[in-house]
Amino acid sequence: MRKHLVFIFVFLVIFFLCHETLAQIAPAPPLKVDNITSILEKGGQFTTFIKLLKATQVADQLNNQLSTPNPNDGLTIFAPSDNAFSGLKPGTLNSLSDQDKLSLVQYHILPTLMTTSQFQTASNPLRTQAGDVKSGKFPLNVTATAGNQVNITTGVVNATVANTVYSDRRIAVYQVDQVLLPLQIFGTAPVPAPAPDVPDKDASVPSPKASKGADTGSSGAVSLKFHQPAMVSFGIAVFGTIFWGL
């Protein structure tokens, strides 16, 4: 009996020691990482936006950023639905260069996490990943009503936040009913300055011959004034000779 008790005691000691050792060696479970592509795929209506995220490699950049342990490094994404993209003029996306497509996608991303309540006190224009707003190239302005409706203005289009697709402590994804078209890419081209007036070739310009003729006419008039007194004097002389001869 004593041998059985000793055996059971030794077995339990060995079991607990092995359990603690295995617990220390076993790796910790991986941290859950939010994947922007999977978030949008669950939304079910962002196929075109997902293609742009992948084509421009912005999806990889966002996923890498979300995998960092810094909890303060948040993101806000305005995701246009497929219906929003279908509202663009045919060929709009195909006409863009690779750089313009990248800027278009980055224009839909804020480098900070913003909740719907924070839009009410946001300082416009908001800074996006597309570039500096001070030069007026990529301005993005938001306004929030009392009913928490968020309106977005780009200078080209006016959009509205339709709903919240996903939100946690690292990222917020909002569906928008319009593709946010930045002023830098889709803005109206400046009106060219008016061309200087060109003189009409058919306009009459005094020719040297005409001027010479005018001078000739003037000289003729002077000649008439010059010879008229002489003829009068000659007439008086003839009259006086005849008169005195009588």
Image (cartoon, rainbow, N blue to C red):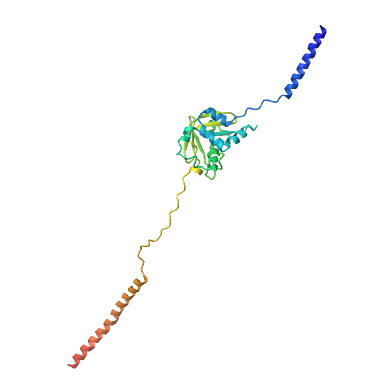
| Numbered-mark total | 0
Residue that extends furthest to the left in the rendered view of this protein: 246
Residue at 56%, 37% (x, y): give it: 55
Picture coordinates of residue 125, whole percent (x, y): 53, 40
Question: In this view, which residue lies farthest toward the right?
Answer: 2
Q: Is residue 153 left or right of residue 224?
A: right
Q: Is residue 168 above or below residue 213?
A: above
Q: Nearer the viewer, residue 196 or 221?
A: 196
Q: Nearer the viewer, residue 15 or 197?
A: 15
Q: Residue furthest bottom?
A: 245
Residue 71 lies left or right of residue 213; in this view the side is: right
Residue at the image position 23 percent from the left and 87 percent from the top? 236
- Quadrant housing the N terminus: top right
| Residue nearer the viewer, 70 or 11 | 11
Residue 35 is situated, as x and y percent measured from the top left of the image, at 59, 30
| Residue displayed at 56% across by 35% down | 54
Location of residue 13 in the rendering, given as x and y in whole percent from the top left corner: 78, 15
Q: Is residue 116 left or right of residue 18?
A: left
How far across and how far down the image is residue 65, in percent?
Answer: 62, 34
> Quarter-wise, where is residue 228 in the image?
bottom left
Q: Quadrant of the C terminus?
A: bottom left
Horizontally, is 89 left or right of 65 in the view? left
Relative to 215, residue 120 above or below? above
